[in-house]
Image (cartoon, grey):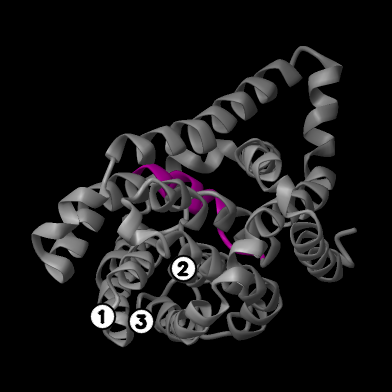
Amino acid sequence: MERHQIVLYLAAILGGCLLGLWLPAGKPVLEITINPLIGLLLYATFLALPLGKLGSAFKDLKFLGALVLVNFLLVPLVVFGLSRFVQNDQALLVGVLLVLLAPCVDYVIVFTNIAGGAGHRLLAATPLLMILQMLLIPAFIFLVMGPKAVELFAPGKFLGAFLGLIVLPLVAATLTRFLAQRSPQAGTLISAAQWLMVPLMMATLAAVVGSQIALVATELQQVLRVLPIFVAFAIIMAAAGTLVAKLSNSDVAAGRALVFSGITRNSLVVLPLALALPAKYELAPTVVVTQTLVELLCMLILIRLVPKILRQTNPVRN
């Protein structure tokens, strides 16, 4: 499965599209499965990570500084520029700002690991990324939209997503590792973690795409307006992340992590926020879902492309 994971992920996306378009009534069921699937995916990911290295990773101030620079200085500048193309449509603007300003803290670790990046460093940085986005994203959107931005936010939903999708799987993985020292059954789970990541990723992709593709198809005209923005964002941030990695003299694994963190957004966390917005922002969820689809396709390309750009023979080194 690992050798053919790209084809398998594409098949999962296609299967999700067909399922969502053929059985649109199944949307609520698929939506219910998304968070549990992401939680299981992160649990398997955390089991496969060297958790003993988290302490040293959190002390890596150079990496954390580069991560903050990419996500909370360069990304807002890029997003502000790209959002000018939809500044006259408040619903589209809110969707673009919500999804692009929020750095991913869950499946970015999976993609980073697949590409040979420092997933454990991103894992150590998730509390920092989550706290900073909870504090700064409302401020960024307020600067762009003014006082009307106040009605958009419910910080408790960010915290709930962080606890459910990050803390709970991490604690469960830590307990499993502890029990593995005393129980062969728990040890078997750790051995199976890497095998489980591919089918869990396939199931997550199928559920996300299947639950939202009918909505995207219905609002296709609006989707076409934001599609170039999301493609441009991925290209610009891939270049920006690579540049920051080289200028900061990051090692190869850290450089790959910076690139993926800069591109991958917290769409699955902000989607419930978008769905809870007032009726006048009803297109915002469509925008978020569109970004998710673009991002997933970009990730399938980047897990092959980034290792070729940032290689062991690359000037990016210790």
Instruction: Give the residues drawn in magenta, as a range.
Output: 116-127
Identify the amino acid type marked 2: Val
Task: Assess whether residue 122 is covered by the magenta stretch.
Answer: yes
Image-based side of 130 in relation to 34, left or right: left
Mark 2 or mark 1: name the one nearer the start of the chain.
Answer: 1
Q: Is residue 60 shown above or below 87?
A: above
User: Badge 1: how crowded within 10 Å, few (<14), some, or many (20+)?
Assistant: some
Q: Is residue 165 shown above or below 3?
A: above
Mark 3 or mark 1: name the one nearer the start of the chain.
Answer: 1
Q: Position of residue 222 (x, y in %)?
A: 48, 78
User: Badge 2: how crowded within 10 Å, few (<14), some, or many (20+)?
Assistant: many
- Comparing marks 3 and 1, which lies closer to the viewer? 1
Residue furthest to the top in view is 182
Name the residue beneath numbered marker 2.
287
Q: Secondary structure at mark 1?
A: loop
Identify the amino acid type marked 3: Leu
Residue furthest to the left in view is 147
Q: At 65% across and 77% down in the image, what residue appears?
A: 307
Q: Secondary structure at mark 3?
A: helix
